[in-house]
Image (cartoon, grey):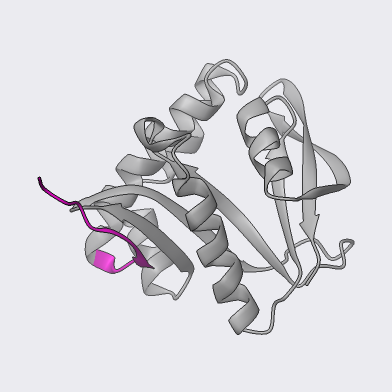
Amino acid sequence: MSTTLIEIRRAKSCDAEAVAETHDEAWRSAYQGIIPGAELEKLISRRGPAWWDNAIAKGSRVALLCFGDRIAGYANYGRNRARSLFYDGEIYELYLRPEFQGLGFGRRLFTAARRDLAQSGLRSLVVWALSDNDPAVEFYRALGGRAVARSSERFGTKNLDKIAFGWQA
């Protein structure tokens, strides 16, 4: 019987290409049929290896969930960007490759990001999800997130609603 090491660690510059591949796979899976095709392609192509390498080099908090030697998912997080919401931290992105979804890995990655934020004094937390992305909405609700705000974002000619989920300390 073989065992596979599952770990969560900070991203390094040498991970940039694998993070870009994970981003590509996860976004295609999550947003195909929600974000218009041409807009989705633009969003994905902007986040290539050079973008991730730059973000990691500048000190962005990017946590990786590694399954053996493969990056299964990532979370990108830091201070809350929405001044109108009174939360300290924000998880900007949390994505898993499709084959790793529904296995509890997202919960582990969320918990690790939340713990890291709390250790930096950012005890309350907000996460945004497109309201048409049912798996994400259900995921954040199952983690105890409470809908605290709504907004919309334009993708080409399409306006999409999004929900902010909040967690207090």
Residue placed most toward the observer, 8 or 57: 8
Work out which quarter of the rendered image holds the C terminus and state it: bottom right
Q: Does 27 appear above or below 95? A: above
Picture coordinates of residue 112, whole percent (x, y) = 51, 65
Which quadrant of the structure image shows residue 66?
Answer: bottom left
| In the depicted structure, whether residue 28 falls above or below residue 77 | above
In the image: residue 2, left or right of residue 65: left
Q: Residue at x 63, y 36 (%)?
A: 136
The residue sitting at 64% across, 77% down in the picture is 118
Q: Residue 60: give x, y in percent of width and height.
A: 48, 70
Whether residue 39 is visible, yes or no, is yes
* Count of numbered badges drawn on the protein: 0
Quadrant containing the N terminus in the rendered view: top left
> Seen from this angle, which residue lies furthest top?
33
Give the image quarter of residue 101: top left
Whether 31 is among the magenta residues is no
Which residue is the extreme one toward the front?
1
Which residue of the protein is positioned furthest toward the left in this rendering?
A: 1
Residue 126 image offset from top left, x and y in percent? 74, 58
Residue sitting at x 62%, y 20%: 34
Q: Position of residue 59 (x, y in %)?
A: 45, 75
Magenta-drawn segment: 1-13
The residue positioned 69% from the left and 42% from the top of the image is: 142
Quick check: can you spot residue 41?
A: no
Q: Nearer the viewer, residue 2 or 58?
A: 2
